[in-house]
Amino acid sequence: MVLNYIWVAFFLVAFVIAAVKLVFLGDYDVFPAMMDSTFSSSKTAFEISLGLTGVLSLWLGVMKVGEKGGVVNALARLLSPVFTKLFPDIPKGHPVTGSIFMNIAANMLGLDNAATPLGLKAMEQMQELNMKKDTASNPMIMFLVLNTSGLTLIPVSIMVYRAQMGAAQPTDIFIPILLATFFSTLAGITITSLYQRINLLNRTILLTLGGACAVVAAIIWGFSQMDPDTMNRVSTTSANILLMMIITGFILAGVRKKVNVYDAFIEGAKDGFQTAVRIIPYLVAILVGIGVFRASGAMDMLIGGMRWCVELTGVNAQWVDAMPTALMKPLSGSGARGMMVDAMTTYGADSFVGRLSCVFQGSTDTTFYILAVYFGSVGVSKTRHAVSCGLLADLAGIIAAIAICYLFFN
């Protein structure tokens, strides 16, 4: 519903601004430009979707091998001690614990198709423990914030889009996204724990979060000591080595579990083809809406206003051009994806704005969509502090993304 209003607003605002330009400024080119944009944007959307087919099939095939090889289960077991402390209201040994772990593990691996059903199952099981059926419980809110903070180890779709848009090194955003999404998740956990008075000062949490913070700090410090060329080379090389290790590890996990790796890969690859075809109408709709909005001059007015406000403070405003992706992400995943593609199309996939848009896309998740789907599935109408915690985590991810991109790409 939110995306419906945004999409309609794109066209209405664009039409009003174009009409004002025509009547008061005598700009006879604005409406032809808008119509040209509708055709070119729809063509671009189809070409992108078609080009995604091969790479999506590859990655979803690899992910299916890892899923059947028990990688999700292994991650769930690894995360178990930490999440037990974050969900103190859930009785030890309750079945919902397994669903929560599996959902988070699947999200970290980018297995959206597996993560959503597990998440809905977890919500149903938590609702059974919930004394007030129309009100979100503490475990529900913590679970939702962990989902909306967007902790992802492998940002497959973003790398696929960068490859399709002609990026020289599609994986160069891998480590920046990993760092930004870490800060988003850390902020979400901390803020929600403060709301719920969960004690984070225990041995398990301190060792886990402290160790993770130390590793992230070491990575940031290490890269800050390098010149830009060395930093880019080391970051890209590290990302490619890690990704190849993950692919190899997934295959070995499948072999160890005696999975027919080839058949599992084919099964996942079929999903990749179907996914590429399925996103065509969504990508056409959002890119046409953005194209009309930009051709009318409305996007320039919006970005120009934001840039003017930022420059008044004396802060470098280069990041403002990527903000449409960040602003759209909490509302709509497909909308943010369209903004990301538009930024790479307009400024270039390897530009600062293009890369920052990709990091924005990967550092948080669709907060309002997740809240609507998960709470709606169990009839919860009173969300308590879920929205504020989710949006504050998003804000932390946005700030971290900007800072990290200035470190890596500026």
Image (tube, grey):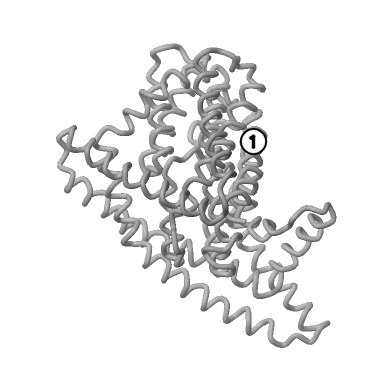
Q: Give the camera-side residue of 120 and 346.
A: 346
Q: How many marks?
A: 1
Q: Residue at x 65, y 69 (%)?
A: 293
Is the residue 47 above or below the residue 357 in the image?
A: below
Quarter of image, res 73: top left
Quarter of image, res 57: bottom left
Is the residue 354 above or below the residue 30 in the image?
A: above
Is the residue 128 above or below the residue 173 in the image?
A: above
SS for dot 1: helix
Residue 286 appears in the figure? no
Instruction: Inspect the image, locate mark 1, and give the three-letter code of the amino acid beneath it.
Output: Val
Quarter of image, res 274: bottom left
Image coordinates for residue 99, horizontal then vertical, percent: 39, 27
Left or right: residue 302 versus residue 376 is: right
Image coordinates for residue 82, horizontal then vertical, percent: 47, 20
Q: Give the camera-side residue of 180 and 257.
A: 180
